[in-house]
C-alpha cells in the first residue's frame, strides 16, 4: 500500500504548523477588516481627502508636503480623518471650538503614538498619565521656579557669547554663510547642561559631544518616518528593519550619555561633596531635585524614573529650543524690517551694557511679539493626541465614539485661514 506524503512522520508537524499559521493569519486579517469597518462607520460623518487604498494619507506627510496640508485645512476648515495605511486612522482637528471642547476633557494621552518614544525618553512626564503624572509634576515643580531661572541669565548669556565668538572667528577668516542650527544646538546643550545639571562640558568648543547631538538629529528623522509608515508600526517589522537596528544603536548612545550624567552626580553626593556643591550654587538644579524628591509617603524616584525624567528634560530642553531659536532667526532674516526693529529695541534697552538682565527681558515687547509669531508659524510641538475614554460631542453636534484617537494639530490651528486672515504672513 502506498502512503501519501502527509501520512509520513516527518511531514505531519510541518503540515500542522502550516495550518496553524494559516488560521492565525486569517484571524488577524479578519480582525483588521473589522477594525477598518468600525473606523469607517465611526468617522463617516466627517468628510476626508482622497486616500490611497494602501498608504492612506501618509505620502504627502512623508514628503513633507506642507502645501498639501494647507490645501486640506482650507477645504476642511474644522477637522478630517487622517488615514495611515488601510487599518489606522486618527481624527485631526484644528478648529478653535473643536480644540476647546477637546482640551476641556481629561482623556488619556494616546498610547498608540506614545509607544514610539519610550525607548528614547522613557516613561517621564511626557508619557505619563493620571495620578503618576500628577505625582511627578508636583515633585518636579520646584525646578521650574522663577527664582531659579533668574539665577541662570548670566550663564545663558555667557553660552550665547561663546557661540557668537565662534561665528565672528568663522566669518573673519572666510567669506561664507554659516549653517546656524548646528551651532545653536550645541549652545542650547551647553545651557541645559550648566543650568539643569550644573555640568561644565565645553561642548561648544570641543567635539566630544558630537555623537550625542548627531544621534538626536538622526533619531528624530527615524521616529518621524516610523510614525507615518504604518508597516513600521509593528514592533517586529521595525526591529528587523535597517532603521530599527539603527534606532536601537542610537538610543544606546543617548542612554549612555544620560547615565553618565546621573552616575557622576551620584558619585559626588556619595563622596560627601553635596555641601560644597550646594554652597557654590545658590539654588538646587534640576538633577538635585530629581535625586532628592520625596512624596508624602517618603518615597523617592526609582532609578528608572530618574533616568526617564533626566532624558526627557535633557532632550526637550535643548533640541526643541535649538530648533525654535533657529526658526526665529530664519523668520527674522526673511523679514528684515522686523529684524531691524528688534535690533533697535534691544540696543535701546541695553544702552552701554553688554548683556541682558532678567528685568530687561520684560521690556522687549516687539521682540517678544516676533518670537511668539514665529512660534505660531512653526510651533515647537506640532500636535498633541488623546485616546477618547468616552464619546465626544463637538459644538456643531458632530460626535465621535470612545476609542478614537484625536490629534489636535497645533500647526493646523495656527495656519487655519478660517482663524487667521493671512496665516502664512
Image (cartoon, helix red, strand yellow):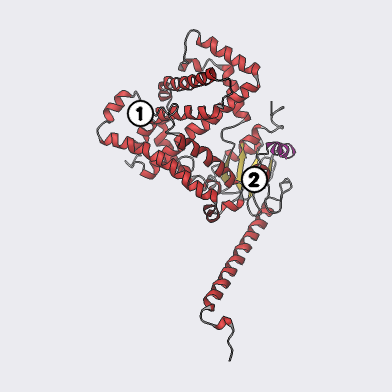
| Disc 2 to disc 1: CB gap under 8 Å | no
Magenta residues (range): 66-76
The reply, left or right, for residue 197 in relation to residue 70 is left
Residue at coordinates 43% horizontally, 20% vertically from top-left? 158
Res 128 visible: no
Residue 100 quadrant: top right
In x, y percent, where is residue 381?
Answer: 56, 35
Farthest residue in the top direction? Answer: 352
Does residue 133 appear in the picture of this structure? yes
- Secondary structure found at label 1: loop
**In the rendered structure, does residue 183 fall within the stretch colored magenta?**
no
**Foreground tag (2 vs 1):** 1
Q: In the picture, which quadrant includes the N terminus?
A: bottom right
Residue denoted by label 2: 91
Is residue 99 depicted above or below 389 in this figure?
above
Find residue 351 and name its label.
none
Measuring from the top left, give residue 2's x and y in whole percent: 59, 89
- State the CA–CA distance, disc 2 to disc 1: 43 Å
**Secondary element at tag 2:** strand
The percent coordinates of residue 292 (x first, y second) are 33, 36
Q: Name the quadrant containing residue 398.
A: top right
**Residue at position x 31%, y 23% from top?**
280
For disc 1, the marked residue is: 284
Relative to the observer, which residue lies in front, 333 or 309? Answer: 333
Mark 2 vs 1, N-terminal side: 2
Q: Residue at x 73, y 37 (%)?
A: 71
Amino acid at each position: 500500500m502506498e502512503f501519501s506524503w502527509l501520512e509520513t512522520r516527518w511531514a505531519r508537524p510541518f503540515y500542522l504548523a502550516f495550518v496553524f499559521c494559516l488560521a492565525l493569519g486569517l484571524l488577524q486579517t479578519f480582525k483588521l477588516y473589522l477594525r477598518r469597518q468600525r473606523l469607517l462607520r465611526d468617522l463617516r460623518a466627517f468628510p476626508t481627502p482622497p486616500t490611497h487604498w494602501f498608504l492612506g494619507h501618509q505620502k504627502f506627510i512623508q514628503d513633507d508636503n506642507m502645501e498639501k496640508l494647507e490645501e486640506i485645512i482650507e477645504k476642511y476648515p474644522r477637522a478630517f480623518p487622517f488615514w495611515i495605511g488601510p487599518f489606522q486612522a486618527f481624527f485631526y482637528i484644528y478648529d478653535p471650538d473643536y480644540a476647546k471642547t477637546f482640551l476641556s476633557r481629561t482623556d488619556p494621552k494616546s498610547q498608540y503614538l506614545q509607544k514610539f518614544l519610550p525607548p528614547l525618553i522613557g516613561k517621564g512626564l511626557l508619557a505619563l498619565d493620571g495620578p503618576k503624572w500628577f505625582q511627578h509634576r508636583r515633585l518636579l515643580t520646584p525646578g521650574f521656579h522663577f527664582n531659579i531661572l533668574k539665577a541662570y541669565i548670566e550663564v545663558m548669556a555667557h553660552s550665547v557669547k561663546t557661540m557668537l565668538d565662534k561665528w565672528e572667528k568663522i566669518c573673519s577668516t572666510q567669506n561664507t554663510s554659516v549653517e546656524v542650527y548646528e551651532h545653536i544646538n550645541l549652545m542650547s546643550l551647553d545651557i541645559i547642561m550648566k543650568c539643569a545639571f550644573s555640568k561644565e562640558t565645553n561642548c561648544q568648543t570641543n567635539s566630544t559631544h558630537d555623537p550625542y547631538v548627531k544621534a538626536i538629529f538622526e533619531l528624530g528623522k527615524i521616529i518621524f518616518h516610523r510614525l507615518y509608515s504604518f508597516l513600521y508600526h509593528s514592533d517586529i517589522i521595525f526591529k528587523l528593519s535597517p532603521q530599527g537596528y539603527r534606532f536601537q544603536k542610537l538610543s544606546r548612545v543617548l542612554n549612555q550619555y544620560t547615565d553618565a550624567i546621573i552616575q557622576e552626580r551620584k558619585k559626588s553626593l556619595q563622596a560627601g561633596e553635596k555641601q560644597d556643591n550646594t554652597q557654590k550654587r545658590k539654588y538646587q538644579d534640576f538633577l538635585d531635585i530629581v535625586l532628592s524628591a520625596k512624596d508624602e509617603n517618603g518615597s523617592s524616584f526609582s532609578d528608572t524614573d530618574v533616568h526617564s525624567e533626566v532624558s526627557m528634560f535633557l532632550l526637550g530642553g535643548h533640541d526643541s529650543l535649538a530648533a525654535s531659536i533657529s526658526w526665529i532667526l530664519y523668520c527674522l532674516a526673511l523679514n528684515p524690517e522686523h529684524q531691524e526693529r528688534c535690533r533697535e529695541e534691544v540696543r535701546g534697552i541695553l544702552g552701554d551694557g553688554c548683556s541682558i538682565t532678567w528685568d530687561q527681558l520684560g521690556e522687549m515687547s516687539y521682540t517678544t511679539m516676533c518670537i511668539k509669531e514665529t512660534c505660531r508659524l512653526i510651533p515647537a510641538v506640532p500636535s498633541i493626541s488623546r485616546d477618547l475614554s468616552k464619546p465626544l460631542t463637538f459644538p456643531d453636534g458632530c460626535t465621535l465614539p470612545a476609542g478614537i484617537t484625536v490629534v489636535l494639530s497645533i500647526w493646523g490651528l495656527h495656519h487655519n485661514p478660517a482663524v487667521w486672515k493671512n496665516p502664512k504672513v
